[in-house]
Image: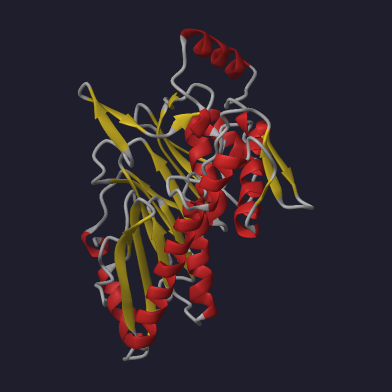
């Protein structure tokens, strides 16, 4: 499970560092220490775990523990798995209050808070939306004029914190935690590694990444992929001990009549959101960056950036439909904008 530190670890975020600097840093560390990790398919996404450790057996056990935890979360929270807690809620919560697993309940409450914060751009009930009629689209336009972004289906989810119950107020309501539990999974993976004494690591689930510590004395270098090619970087960030999430129209999509149709759905219409190609959010908590990257994508450049201005610990980069780059004012560690890296810093 040992791997080359110059490997590309994930898409659409790329992790890199200068080759010369890496060689020096590795020599300066304990001679027995090295990078260890693995990549597997879980949660319908590519999951990657990379850690720095001086004990190969211990490292393998730590990596396996993270994958086991992510698999557990998937089985607990994936609405597509019939035996999951969320699937059970969807079956029963329309007819009566359902007592919910504490872990799922807490994440639902966080999701509902984000729905209120984003005025419905993030909505765990988006799965309830069917293909809209002309009248639906007309109404959605009226909602948009009022600066609301969703169908407000999240208001149909009634929670009782004392009894830890959930009940749907409208027939046909369904929830999905797919827009937030990837971030939760990487946070839990990082917590497991911290408990095991790991100080430098990367945990990635799809477009969500948690970075533990720094890269052995240097900042982690995060490359933001060009949505047009998904091969080149349009910007790079230097960050430490943070979470990074990207939502893009090129990450999950299907082809229809020769056109690429992505799966980031605007709750108000049930249709793919337009106007943005990619939204990346950086901050301390992957649960929040996961939800915010989706929200910013749906809200668009102006409102999305304005939302981030109200959250001092979170910053973002948005690529609009024309390929223009926009980033929040606090993101001062932008390294470049579409400029090629020098040969010394190539992966």
Determine the residue positioned at 54% across, 70% down. Answer: 191
Residue 116 figure quarter = top right
- Please state which of residues 228 and 82 is positioned toward the viewer in this rendering: 82
Q: For this view, does 70 lie left or right of residue 89?
A: left
Q: In the rendered image of this protein, does residue 136 appear above or below residue 275?
A: above
> Is residue 184 something one can see in this rendering?
yes
- Image location of residue 265, percent across then percent down: 45, 30
- Image location of residue 90, percent across then percent down: 55, 40
Q: In the rendered image of this protein, does residue 27 appear above or below residue 113?
A: below
Q: For this view, does 40 lie left or right of residue 264?
A: left
Which residue is farthest bottom?
31
Check the picture and name the quadrant holding the N terminus: bottom left
Determine the residue positioned at 49% across, 39% down. Answer: 294
- Image location of residue 148, percent across then percent down: 62, 24
Q: In the rendered image of this protein, does residue 37 appear above or below residue 231?
A: below
> Is residue 332 something one can see in this rendering?
no
Check the picture and name the quadrant holding the C terminus: bottom left
């Amino acid at each position: 499970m040992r791997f080359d530190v110059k490997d590309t670890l994930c898409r659409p975020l790329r992790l890199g560092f200068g080759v010369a600097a890496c060689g020096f840093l590795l020599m300066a560390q304990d001679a027995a220490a090295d990078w260890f990790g693995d990549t597997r398919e879980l949660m319908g996404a590519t999951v990657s775990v990379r850690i720095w450790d001086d004990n190969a057996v211990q490292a393998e056990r730590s990596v396996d523990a993270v994958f086991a935890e992510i698999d557990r979360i998937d089985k607990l929270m994936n609405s597509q798995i019939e035996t999951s807690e969320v699937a059970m809620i969807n079956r029963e919560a329309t007819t009566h209050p359902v007592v919910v697993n504490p872990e799922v309940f807490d994440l639902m409450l966080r999701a509902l808070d984000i729905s209120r914060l984003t005025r419905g751009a993030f909505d765990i009930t988006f799965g309830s939306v069917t293909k809209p009629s002309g009248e639906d689209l007309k109404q959605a336009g009226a909602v948009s004029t009022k600066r609301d972004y969703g169908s407000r289906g999240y208001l149909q989810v009634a929670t009782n914190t004392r009894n830890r119950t959930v009940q749907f107020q409208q027939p046909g309501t369904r929830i999905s935690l797919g827009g937030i539990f990837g971030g939760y999974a990487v946070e839990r993976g990082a917590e497991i590694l911290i408990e095991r004494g790991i100080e430098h690591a990367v945990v990635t689930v799809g477009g969500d990444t948690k970075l533990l510590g720094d890269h052995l004395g240097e900042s982690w270098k995060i490359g933001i992929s060009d949505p047009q090619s998904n091969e080149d970087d349009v910007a790079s960030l230097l960050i430490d001990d943070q979470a990074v999430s990207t939502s893009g129209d090129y990450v999950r999509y299907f082809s229809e009549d020769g056109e690429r149709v992505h799966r980031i759905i605007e709750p108000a219409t049930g249709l793919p959101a337009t106007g943005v190609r990619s939204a990346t959010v950086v901050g301390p908590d992957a649960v929040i960056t996961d939800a915010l990257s989706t929200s910013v994508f749906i809200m668009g450049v102006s409102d999305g950036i304005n939302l981030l201005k109200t959250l001092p610990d979170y910053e973002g980069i948005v690529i609009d439909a024309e390929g223009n780059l926009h980033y929040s004012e606090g993101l001062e560690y932008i390294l470049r904008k579409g400029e090629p890296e020098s040969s010394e810093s190539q992966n």
